[in-house]
């Protein structure tokens, strides 16, 4: 099972409700939080939706 690690780099303040909900779905809610998730198409789509607020951590 492949995994992807995501770190939140941007604030959800002044973002739309759906972007805030997407961050929560990824397990992120504060700056600097890191979440490790399964590498599925749905997770990749969520990352693409908030790509300006997160970064994918190599490793």
Image (spheres, grey):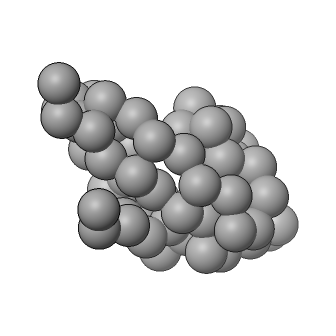
Front position in the image: 12 or 30: 30
Classify residue 44 by image quadrant. Answer: top left
Q: Position of residue 41 (x, y in %)?
A: 18, 33
Q: Position of residue 40 (x, y in %)?
A: 21, 30
Residue 33 lies left or right of residue 42; in this view the side is right
- Kindly identify the residue that appears in the image at 75 percent across and 68 percent down: 31
Front position in the image: 58 or 41: 58
Image quarter where the N terminus lies is top left
Q: Position of residue 39 (x, y in %)?
A: 23, 36
- Kindly identify the residue that appears in the image at 36 percent across and 65 percent down: 56
- Kindly identify the residue that appears in the image at 70 percent across and 68 percent down: 32
Residue ranking furthest to the front? 59
Residue 54 lies left or right of residue 44; in this view the side is right
Q: Position of residue 22 (x, y in %)?
A: 56, 40
- State whether residue 9 is above or below residue 51: below
- Kindly identify the residue that appears in the image at 76 percent across and 49 percent down: 29
Asked whether residue 42 appears in the rendered view, the answer is yes
Classify residue 16 by image quadrant. Answer: bottom right
Residue 3 lies left or right of residue 5; in this view the side is left
Asked whether residue 22 appears in the rendered view, the answer is no
Residue ranking furthest to the top? 1
């Amino acid at each position: 099972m492949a995994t992807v690690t995501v770190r939140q780099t941007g604030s959800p303040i002044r973002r739309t409700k759906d972007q805030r909900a997407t961050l929560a779905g990824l397990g992120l809610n504060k700056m600097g939080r890191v979440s490790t998730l399964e590498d599925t198409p749905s997770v990749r789509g969520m990352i693409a939706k908030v790509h300006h607020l997160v970064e994918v951590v190599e490793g």
